[in-house]
Image: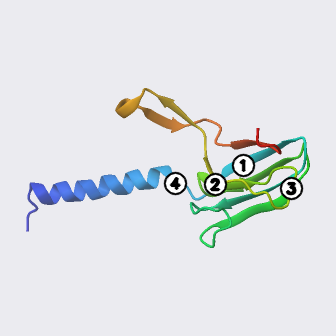
């Protein structure tokens, strides 16, 4: 039984899709995350895997939760390219939670509009500078 043009086209498309999807994701890929507490007061922070807000949703997985002093630098990693982060603010560092934020690996983008193309930055680290005031 010979395959017609449509049959070969479908096989080629499936093969290309398999190569494309296997090329980007490696099992050992992790996203480094670095949180720097700028102060001037302590804050509580939580970082989670997942896309559901707030970050402590049942659909998310908490990677970090704690209270940190000014000047502290906290490093962790996530298997995802984006994390959910939420923090508190002074003068109530235990209860004054701000909105949840989705923060992703840095990218380098060129062009604008439909012609814009983005590629991952050479350094995949998500860096967040956390202030204890809302200004």
The residue wearing badge 1 is: 33
Q: Secondary structure at mark 2?
A: strand
Looking at the rendered image, the disc whose residue lies closer to the viewer, 1 or 3, is 3
Q: Is residue 111 above or below residue 50?
A: above
Residue 27 in view of the camera = yes
Check disc 1: other Cα within 10 Å, few if <14, some if 14-19, many if 20+. many
Q: Are marks 1 and 2 in contact (CB under 8 Å)?
A: yes
Q: Secondary structure at mark 1?
A: strand
Front residue of 2/89: it is: 89
Give the Cα separation between the discs numbered 1 and 4.
Answer: 18 Å
Q: Is residue 5 left or right of residue 126?
A: left
> Which mark, residue 25?
4
Give the Cα separation between the discs numbered 4 and 2.
Answer: 17 Å
Q: Position of residue 132 (x, y in %)?
A: 83, 45
Q: Are marks 1 and 4 in contact (CB under 8 Å)?
A: no
Labels 4 and 2: the sequence-earlier one: 4
């Amino acid at each position: 039984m010979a395959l017609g043009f449509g049959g070969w086209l479908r096989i080629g498309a499936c093969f290309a899709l398999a190569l494309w999807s296997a090329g980007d994701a490696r099992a050992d890929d992790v996203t480094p995350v670095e949180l720097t507490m700028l102060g001037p007061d302590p804050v509580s922070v939580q970082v989670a895997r997942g896309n559901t807000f707030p970050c402590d949703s049942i659909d998310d997985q908490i990677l970090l939760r704690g209270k940190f002093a000014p000047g502290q630098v906290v490093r962790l990693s996530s298997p995802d390219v984006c994390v959910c982060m939420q923090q508190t603010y002074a003068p109530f560092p235990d209860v004054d939670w701000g909105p949840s934020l989705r923060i992703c690996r840095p990218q380098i983008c060129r062009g604008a509009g439909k012609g814009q193309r983005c590629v991952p930055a050479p350094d995949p680290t998500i860096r967040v500078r956390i202030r204890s005031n809302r200004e």
